[in-house]
Every structure is written in structure tokens, then in C-alpha cells.
Amino acid sequence: GLGNFVNILREVTFNPLMAENLTFQDSKSGSYLFETTGSYTHADENYARELMQLFTIGVFLLNDDGTKMLNENGEPIPTFSNDEVMSFARVFTGFVQSQPRGNFEENDSSWNALDELIVDPIYHDKFPKHDLTGGYIGDGYPLCVDLPSRMFLRKGATYRLLGDSPRPHAFIDEGTPMNDGPARVFELGENSRLREILCNSVNGSCQFQMTVTLDSNIECDTKECQVDEARVLKVHDVYYEYIRPPCVEQVFFNDSKKVTYKNSFRHSSCANPLLPHAAEACCTEGNGGTLTATRYTEYVFDHERVNFSAANVRCSRDGLSQCDFNFVQGDGVVGLHWTNSACQIAIKVNPEGKVAIVYEAMANIIHPNVHKDNMNYFKVYWNGDFPRNSLDENGGNSCGNGECSPLEDGGCFCYIEVDEEAVFSKMPRTDEVLSKLYIGAYDPLTYNDDMFSKEFGEGVIAYLAGGAYSSSTVFEVEDSFGRVRLMKNSIETVRVKNSEYSFRNAPSFMSLLNEESAERDALNEVNALVDHLLYHQNTAPFIASRLIQRFATSNPDPIYVSSVAKSFRTGKYGSLGSGKYGDLAATVSAILLDP
């Protein structure tokens, strides 16, 4: 009856009246403002601060009985600093009202305070956000590059009904194809198993469902076998959009390639060649100075994305090759296209050790978010010292003893590379998995049956690729909150080239490519932050104390608080409650029925 505390947090977060009251409605990221106005402004901090201070963890760390934890000097320990407020404020950018509707009284065509807010990905901050526990919002989530091949046909793939319009809600598809003929859409074939599932035929007539989730892997059919990642699919006369599972991108990667639009004078950027971020652009080899490219003749749909390797294969099938084109002509020319031009990824390091990403490529214009002048600094976790400009502070290290270059306005400019290595070479303990691994993993059952073999330890299941421990190994454990966690046996380290300076690679739900910015990913990031606060050690005793003060007594006994906090964590009070963390029926029962 009373539901779960996490549902209240999410309802409050997306409530337009709360957004108006705590002023985060229409808050825009600093990167968006820098891109559009040339000035940088920090995101509105009100809701990020109050969400922690009033709604979840409070101001000071607490013991289970609600008493304050003390440091070695006998002083209370703060739960957060202004650094975390500023980091979390960037999560709450892009919140805007839903479109007004006219089916309720006293409606205003310019205002909708009834429906929940939506997140506009263009306004949402795209860069990593550090958390409260020495990590990032996005730690524990799988990498998008680790998605099984054709994930849209795998167990857990989710589809949402769009109706008779192919316009997606979860992501952005730029413009209309630049052609005189009809748009090329991804229409499922008559023998497609996916088409059969989405149709959901009863007595020969499709009974379309609002949401469909695959409960097992299915085989691909004809055109489906050519697609890296589905977006919008046509089934008879209606459309579904594919909702990719929550995943993160590591913001630093090797072997980056330049991507750009059909006209190379528009913004260019760098992309991870392992991800389906762009379409192919194919040229005749050695066709001189003005390179005009075309798409692969058998591409499946206009807004299709493939990874760099697949783009190469497609071009070769047409007897062409990828190039650093000037223009892409022909049908289906929308969004970004791969080039064969390499990119350099670098960082600016400010005096505090925060970094900003810089892309360098042979291009007329580099996107402002990653241009050398950008101000999109975020926290990283250095392994020891970091390059410091001697002009910024006494005792600087000459920008890493000259391995980086000093910047005129302060800080250092450094080129980087990324290393990946396995963390464990044998079966670890549960606590080791949870404390030393940061990258999540997909359910091994979504991969082919022969992908993994199992090995069992005490409280740990290891899924071994190729029968041996490697960076591809997945460990399954249960954490202290009763959650099953799948963690990849890998750590990625970003190293300043030719130096000893390094830090852990940072995950982000949002792609740095504007074309790949998606409401789907922004919502995943918001949910990840809510979960981060929900499962913080402070939340159970803090919420227990506050609810007791409202329902029972203003000065609760520590034993009373501890009992209620236990019910919040276990989701049970005697026979009452669902057994799920945050269950409010169990929590309120513990308050009202305490002897």
C-alpha cells in the first residue's frame, strides 16, 4: 500500500512544482551555454543540495542508531561537500516541462504543472560526475562497448510503441533524409521472429503492446543480421523504438577516428571506433582533392549507425573505401559519418587536478564541448601527483617535468593513452570484487551459450571467457543491500604519455557527441544518482529518524531508530512488508508498532 521510498524520490524529482520551487527547471549545462553563448555558468545547485540534505542522507554521517559518527577529533563528519553539490547539480540539467495538454481544467497553453518533467538531452550535461564514495555516477554499470552483438535481439531487449509516427522519444534522429524519394526505414520482414513478437497476433490481428521485453535470445532475419544497433522499427503500419539497456561510455579511449556531418565544414568530433556512432562514407580510392563520398548502397535505414570496422566492410563491398571526405551525396545522408582520419585525445589539467577533454583532428571546426578553449572540467582520481603548472603555484612540477605543455591561462595540456588490464588472476572474495572493480557487466545469459564457462567460489560466481581469468571475466556477487552485482574483471587507466602520471578512466552515461545525446541516457543517469543516494549508508538511519519525528516522537531513542532503520533496509517488520530495501509499509509498521 505505501510503496517504496525510491518511488517517492523519483516522483519528487520529476515533479514540475518541485522543479519550480527548487529552481532546477530549465537549468542548462555549462557546456551547452559555452557552446551557444561562449560563456560558462555552473548548473543550478538547489535541488542537488536539498535532495541530499533533506530527502536522503542528511548533513552528517550517522551510525545505524541515528547518532553522529565522529572523527579522531570528536567532530561530526560531513556527508558531502560543495564539490558533490556541484557534481550532482549537473545531473539535474535539461529538466523541462512536458508539452501542455488541454484535457484538464484551468489549462494554460504555455504551462504544464500536471505531467512529470522530461529531460532534454541537448541541455543535459554530458561529462562525468563524481559521487560521494570516491567513484563516479555510472560505476557498476556495464560498458556500451561490451553490449553483445545485436543486443536488440537478445534477452532483456526492450521496445516501446510509438504508434503511426517514426519519430523516436528516447533519442535524437537529426532531420529528414536529404533525398527526393521516400525515407528508408527499418521494416521487419515477414519471417522475422521479432516482428512476430511485436505484432502479438490474436486471431490473425496484431495486438500491439505499449512495452515489449524479450525473455530470450532470438535469431536474426535478413536485414536484421546487417544491423549493429536498432533504433526505430516498422511492424505492419506502426513503429516501435528500441530502448538500449543502461550502459556507460568511458570518456577516454584509444584509436579514435574523426566523425563529421555530410558537409565537412560543420562541427567535427572524435568517436570511439568500437561503438556504432556514425554511418559509413565511401569514396573512390585516389579520387583527388575534392572528396565526395556516398553511403553503402545496401544500408538498412537512414538513421542507421555502425562501428568503424563495419563501415569499412560496407565500403569495401561497394568497391570503395572510407576517406576524409568534403561532402556526402545521395540518399539517407543524415547525422554523423565516419572518416578514415585519426584523432588525438588530450586533456587540460587545472590547478586543482580536474581535467577537461580536448579533441584534435584535421577539421575546419572542432565541436566547442571538446575544443581546446572549453571549460568543461571534471574530477578525476589521480594515482598520486598530477601535472602542475609552476606559474599557478609554488612547488609546481613544470607541467610534469615538461611532459605536458603549460597553458597561458594556467594549467597544463597533456596527451594521453589508455591501458586496460585484468584485476584478478584467480577467484576473489566478495568484498574484493565490490571494492576493487568499478565496471559493471551484462547478464552472461545474453551472450552466446558457449561464450562463458562457470567457476564457483565462496559467495562468488566467475564467468570465464575462454576458460581463463582475463579482463573479460565477469564476477557475480551479492552486496550488503541484497543486490546481485555483475562486475567486469577490468580496470582502465588513463596515462599521460611519456610520464608517470595516471588516473582511472571515467564513465559517463551521456555521449560527448551531440548526435548521440539521448533522453534515454539522461534518464539512466538520473536514476543512477537516485540509487546512489538511496543505497548510501546514511539513508536508512536518516529516514528512520525523520519519519519517527513525524509519526511518534521528536527525540527518538537510538534503539528505536536502529529498529526502524533495520526495517527500512530489510523491507520487513515481522510478517509485514515486501522484503525489498526501502519498503515503506515495513518502515511505518516498525514506527507505529514498536513496543
Image (cartoon, rainbow, N blue to C red):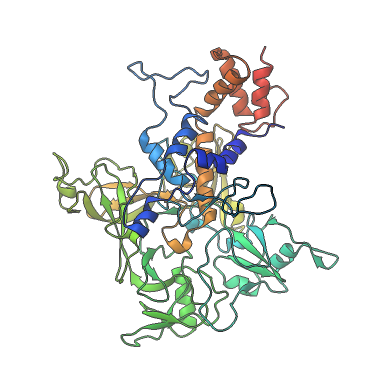
Q: Nearer the viewer, residue 12 or 192?
A: 12
Q: Residue 534: give x, y in percent of width and height.
A: 54, 34
Q: Is residue 456 visible?
A: no
Residue for point 41% across, 50% down = 29
Q: Residue 216: give x, y in percent of width and height.
A: 68, 56
Q: Is residue 223 left or right of residue 342?
A: right
Q: Is residue 245 left or right of residue 218?
A: left
Q: Residue 147: give x, y in percent of width and height.
A: 53, 58
Kindly give the residue lying farthest to the bottom in the view shown.
287
Q: Quadrant of the N terminus?
A: top right
Residue 153 drawn above or below residue 77: below
Q: Quadrant of residue 159?
A: bottom right
Q: Nearer the viewer, residue 456 or 228?
A: 228
Q: Quadrant of the C terminus?
A: top right
Residue for point 41% across, 58% down = 512
Kindly give the residue lying farthest to the right in the view shown.
203
Q: Is residue 175 visible?
A: yes
Q: How many marks?
A: 0
Q: Residue 210: give x, y in percent of width and height.
A: 70, 56
Q: Nearer the viewer, residue 536 or 217?
A: 536
Q: Is residue 548 left or right of residue 203?
A: left
